[in-house]
Image (cartoon, rainbow, N blue to C red):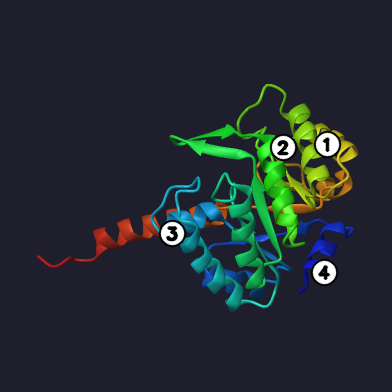
């Protein structure tokens, strides 16, 4: 699927449900299940390779995993690029160029930064410069993520709108606001920002039909499925250890 076709998935009547995956096998399962598009989970990929979330994984190792995911499926793949794995816009653009060259059609790029295990709200101006640098080399879908709710900003909605307007002017194609859950907040945001809104699946999120009515255009679940599967695996391994006689 072309970048143009991927972009069009964000402008339909129904929200695009992204299948978040972490390796080639999970990507194939999501494709078989009928998802129209995939998004990688940076958190899941990092954990899979023994790293903590928050750009602890080297970009080359992320690229290796993404390359195998892209080869394993025929549906479009977007990559969670966190904050770009660099504070230098030119370096971020080079990373994106490598992704575009293997057929990646979109990225998530965030203004949150993890320091000492805690996420902080970063510079909106820096994210704008990164978006501009990317758009000079590729027209792939830039889903600009703002972490005003994740970082518990004193005015998460107002700050999200302010930052999203800047990202829109810089060239972002869509906006991702994790943990925006209140229907009234979503309604106000959509009325202020004329770009496709991506929300994160949580127990407090309105029902799918209401999200559609509110104007949400994309829904993702991040590392939630990965975390659930590994929790199940942990329990299975504990049970196995109890029931199977291990060698002395």
Nearest-to-viewer mark from 4 and 2 = 4
Q: Which of 4 and 207 is in front in this view?
A: 4
Between discs 3 and 2, the one toward the N terminus: 3
How far is mark 3 from mark 4, CA to CA?
A: 31 Å
- Indicate the secondary structure of the residue bearing disc 4: helix
Furthest residue in direction left, as rendered: 248
Residue 74's place in the image compared with 138, above or below, is below
Is 174 placed left or right of 123 in the picture? right
Residue 15 % position (x, y): 81, 56
Asked if the residues shown at circle 4 and circle 2 are in contact, with their CB atoms under 8 angstroms apart, the answer is: no
How far is mark 4 from mark 2, CA to CA?
A: 27 Å
Nearest-to-viewer mark from 3 and 4 = 4
Name the residue that disc number 2 marks. Answer: 180
Asked if the residues shown at circle 2 and circle 1 are in contact, with their CB atoms under 8 angstroms apart, the answer is: yes
How far is mark 3 from mark 1, CA to CA?
A: 35 Å
Name the residue that disc number 1 marks. Answer: 189
Residue 29's place in the image compared with 198, above or below, is below
Nearest-to-viewer mark from 2 and 1 = 1
Crowding around mark 1 (Cα neighbors within 10 Å: few <14, some 14 to 19, many 20+) is many
Name the residue that disc number 3 marks. Answer: 48
Residue 183 % position (x, y): 80, 36
Between discs 2 and 1, the one toward the N terminus: 2
Query: Residue at coordinates 59% horizontally, 47% vertically from top-left?
Result: 88
Crowding around mark 3 (Cα neighbors within 10 Å: few <14, some 14 to 19, many 20+) is few
Residue 216 % position (x, y): 82, 48
Is 114 placed left or right of 132 in the picture? left
Name the residue that disc number 4 marks. Answer: 5
Residue 128's place in the image compared with 142, above or below, is above
How far is mark 2 from mark 1, CA to CA?
A: 10 Å
- Indicate the secondary structure of the residue bearing disc 3: helix
Crowding around mark 2 (Cα neighbors within 10 Å: few <14, some 14 to 19, many 20+) is many
Asked if the residues shown at circle 3 and circle 4 are in contact, with their CB atoms under 8 angstroms apart, the answer is: no
């Amino acid at each position: 699927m072309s970048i143009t076709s991927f972009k069009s998935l964000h402008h339909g009547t129904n929200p695009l449900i992204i299948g978040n995956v972490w390796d080639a096998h999970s990507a194939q399962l999501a494709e078989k299940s009928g998802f129209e598009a995939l998004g990688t989970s940076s958190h899941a990929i990092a954990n899979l390779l023994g790293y903590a979330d928050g750009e602890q994984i080297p970009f080359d190792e992320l690229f290796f995993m993404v390359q195998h995911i892209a080869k394993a499926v025929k549906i479009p793949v977007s990559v969670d690029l966190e904050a770009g794995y660099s504070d230098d816009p030119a370096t971020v653009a080079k990373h994106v160029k490598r992704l575009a060259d293997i057929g990646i059609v979109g990225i998530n790029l965030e203004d949150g930064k993890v320091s000492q295990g805690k996420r902080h709200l970063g510079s909106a101006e820096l994210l704008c410069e990164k978006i501009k640098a990317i758009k000079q080399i590729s027209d792939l879908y830039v889903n600009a993520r703002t972490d005003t709710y994740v970082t518990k900003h004193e005015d998460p909605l107002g700050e999200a709108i302010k930052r999203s307007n800047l990202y829109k002017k810089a060239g972002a194609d869509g906006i991702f606001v994790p943990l925006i859950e209140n229907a009234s907040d979503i309604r106000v945001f959509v009325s202020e920002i004329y770009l496709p809104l991506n929300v994160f699946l949580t127990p407090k999120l309105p029902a799918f039909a209401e999200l559609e009515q509110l104007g949400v255009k994309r829904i993702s679940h991040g590392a939630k499925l990965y975390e659930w599967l590994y929790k199940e695996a942990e329990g299975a391994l504990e049970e196995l250890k109890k029931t199977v006689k291990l060698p002395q």
